[in-house]
Image: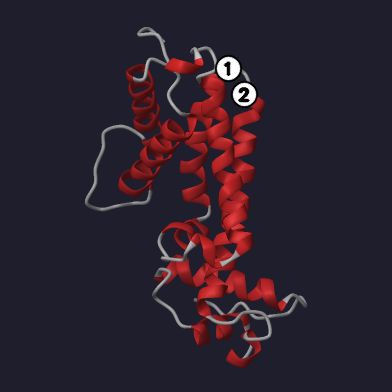
Amino acid sequence: MGKQGYHHGNLRQALVDATLLLITEKGPQGFTLSEAAKAAGVTPAAVYRHFTGREELIAEAARQGYEIFADLTEFAYNKGQPTALAAFEATGRAYLAFARRYPGHYQAMFESGISMNSNPGLAAAATRAGRVSEQAAEELSRHIPPGKRPPASMFSAHIWAMSHGVVELFARGNPGARSPFPPEELLEAGIGIYLRGLGLLPPDA
């Protein structure tokens, strides 16, 4: 890894950026606080002016990841346009795109073991990201009478889990997993089958 150096006056963000590069290269448990400081071009002691330790540094990387993810998901959702189904499927594809484009953030969020409650900002960002998916689920099920409508939080969580599984198995270069179909097609087909099973889509949709 080439030394990035701290030149632009924002040490806090320089440390986060260095951490994200290290996470991408070594995984969230594969580096030390000293390595993060060195990659940012400062001494380990300088880190403590902004973070209490390595976990708080990773938590900030995760928080920023959730903010980016929420922005991408909101953009993909596009206020439910052109249709509720298309918007809902777009949020799933946004998950795949995020994991590919922001691997350091993705790992900080989902593979570091950081508790969502370790940082109020992290918890708020994660809640915001989940709210977009729930809103998409609510719109998709609005045509069903309330007494027969599946909980939006339930099936949005199922789609999130399905998206996560496709990412882990097929979208991150897993050498042990092979599929004759692109990850996006796998996810779209899975979403369609699942939603028909819940009665949210007609058989020919």
Label 1: element kind: loop
Residue at left offset 61%, top offset 46%: 128
Residue at left offset 38%, top offset 15%: 199
Gap between marks 2 and 1 measured at Cα: 6 Å
Q: Quadrant of the C terminus?
A: top left
Query: As displayed, is residue 30 above or below residue 186?
Result: below
Q: Locate residue 10, reporting x and y percent.
A: 74, 75
Q: Locate residue 121, reporting x and y percent.
A: 64, 61
Three-letter amino acid code of the residue under disc 1:
Thr
Residue at left offset 46%, top offset 83%: 32
Name the residue at the left extreme.
176
- Quarter of the image holding residue 63? bottom right
Q: Locate residue 44, reporting x and y percent.
A: 58, 90
Q: Which residue is mark 1?
A: 83
Q: Please give left or right for residue 166 compared with residue 71 in the image.
A: left
Q: Which residue is mark 2?
A: 80
Q: Locate residue 154, reporting x and y percent.
A: 42, 34
Q: Nearest the camera: 96 or 205?
A: 205
Three-letter amino acid code of the residue under disc 2:
Gly
Q: Are marks 2 and 1 in contact (CB under 8 Å)?
A: yes
Circle 1 packing at 10 Å, graded few (<14), some (14-19), many (20+), is: some
Query: As displayed, is residue 86 above or below residue 110?
Result: above
Q: Give the label on residue 180, or none.
A: none
Label 2: element kind: helix
Circle 2 packing at 10 Å, graded few (<14), some (14-19), many (20+), is: some
Query: As displayed, is residue 4 above or below residue 114?
Result: below
Name the residue at the right extreme.
9
Q: How many marks?
A: 2
Name the residue at the front extreme.
147
Q: Nearest the camera: 102 or 58?
A: 58
The structure's colour scheme is: secondary structure
